[in-house]
Image (cartoon, rainbow, N blue to C red):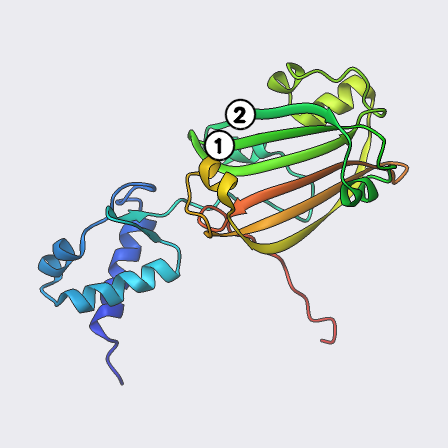
Amino acid sequence: MSVRPKYSQIADQLIQLIVSEKQQLNTRFFTENELSKKYNVSRSTIRAALSELEDLKFITKAKNTGYYVSYEPAKFDFAKFYSFSKVAHKENLAPTSELLMFAKTTPNYYIAQKLGLKQDELVYRIERLRMLNFQPILFEKTFLPAKRFPKLRRNELFKNSLYDLLSTKYALKIKDGEEEFFASLINARESELLDLKVGTPCLKIQRRTFDVDHIPFEFTITTAPSRYFSYKVPLANNEV
């Protein structure tokens, strides 16, 4: 029987520390020097162990400051509608949102097509920065047909979730929706908002939502940094 490499054995022990919550999420992790002394091995062995933890998203290396325990991914079920706030509360996280923009504007061709509008028809453009435990994690741009939701007010968005507001104020009945995922990189503006480097990997999620008559009423583009979120999709082998 072959013996597992020392770095792999150390990686297992460090993972157990994190999983058992003896190392809290989003806190400073051990340094290479500390771990080298603790396990009486070379720094190169420790670096190999830490590399395994990075690959598995247990820790993240921050430039000039060392390693940190990675954020626990929020669990969103994309097979059904989800509420950011409700999911966050379920995970014992404190959700907050910063409303960056609320304006009436004309959409570009792509967004007009997604909402079934002419390009000269007005839309509400709503930009929000989503936070968990006061850490920015999502940037959302939402577009709504203005004629569908007259007299929508900025201050109303502070008091209600968007779907609850539209359902209550306009008797909207949501039927279903669709989402597309694209691999992308954080741009300059997103870098400032999400406190990440330009070029950091992320997902761009485009969501289009329909009412009971299958008329689109919402189009949202979400920037989701891969550092904070994981997505699980079930697969089935229909040939078995």
Q: Which of the 4 image quarters holds residue 218?
A: top right
Separation of marks 2 and 1 at Cα, in angstroms: 8 Å
Q: Are marks 2 and 1 in contact (CB under 8 Å)?
A: yes
User: Which percent across, then down, holds residue 62?
Assistant: 30, 48
Q: First in sequence: mark 2 or mark 1?
A: 2
Nearer the observer, 199 or 170:
199
Can residue 193 be seen at all in this image of the molecule? Answer: yes
Left or right: 212 in relation to 43: right
User: Which percent across, then down, holds residue 72?
Assistant: 42, 45
Can residue 232 be seen at all in this image of the molecule? Answer: no
Give the residue type at disc 1: Met
Q: If the image is split into quadrants, where does the N terminus sit? A: bottom left
Q: Is residue 152 above or below residue 188?
A: above
SS under mark 1: strand
Q: Residue at x 46, y 46 (%)?
A: 228
Give the residue type at disc 2: Glu
Q: Is residue 128 above or below residue 69?
A: above
* Res 98 label: 2
User: Which percent across, then down, holds residue 35?
Assistant: 15, 57
* Res 131 label: 1
Q: Residue at x 35, y 58 (%)?
A: 54
Q: If the image is split into quadrants, where does the C terminus sit? A: bottom right
User: Which percent across, then down, holds residue 186?
Assistant: 50, 48
Q: Which of the 4 image quarters holds residue 170?
A: top right
Specify few, some or many for label 2: CA neighbours under 10 Å numbering under 14, 14-19, or 20 or more.
few
Disc number lying in front (2 or 1) = 2
Left or right: 202 in relation to 119: left
Q: Residue at x 68, y 34 (%)?
A: 142
